[in-house]
Amino acid sequence: MDIQVLKGKFNQSRDYNTDDVNALMDFAKKAYIHNEIDINEYRLLVRELETQGAVIPENNKENSLIENS
């Protein structure tokens, strides 16, 4: 799967288009969690989205279910 296919699936699922790489990264993460894409596809998508400027928000660490020691 490439970014264009991911955008198409995003549009189909959400009923609007986006070029926001962070929204696409979240969408790819959810697709991976729900076993809609495999780990290799996920890694390639994340790598490509990161090169386009996507970042993981810092507040994800605050909302983590894993305790930091």
Image (tube, rainbow, N blue to C red):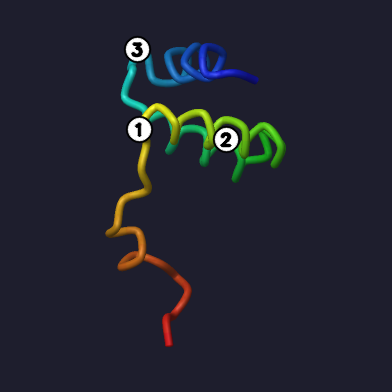
Q: Secondary structure at mark 2?
A: helix
Q: Quadrant of the C terminus?
A: bottom left
**Residue 35, horizontal then vertical, whole percent:** 68, 39
Spatial CA distance of label 1 from label 3 is: 18 Å
Residue located at (47% from left, 16% from top): 7
From the image, tell me which residue sits under label 2.
Answer: 31
Q: Which label sits in the foreground, 1 or 3?
A: 1
Specify the quadrant of the image occupied by residue 68: bottom left
The earlier-in-sequence mark between 2 and 3 is 3
Find residue 5 and report its horizontal and vertical position in percent: 56, 13
Quickly name the residue at label 1: 53
Q: Amino acid at mark 2?
A: Ala
Query: Which amino acid, mark 3?
Result: Asn
Above-or-below relation of 61 to 67:
above
Up the image or down, 3 lies above or below 32; here it is above
Contact between marks 2 and 1 (CB within 8 A): the answer is no
Where residue 65 appears, x then y in whole percent?
45, 70
Q: Which comes before the other along the chain, label 2 or label 1?
A: 2
Residue 29 coordinates in the image, percent (x, y): 52, 41
Using the image, tell me which numbered label, if any, was put on residue 68: none
Compared across the picture, whether 55 is left or right of 35 comes to: left
Residue to which mark 3 is pinned = 17
Q: Secondary structure at mark 1?
A: loop
Q: Residue at x 39, y 20 (%)?
A: 14
How many badges with numbers are in the image?
Answer: 3
Q: Hey, what amino acid is under mark 1?
A: Gly
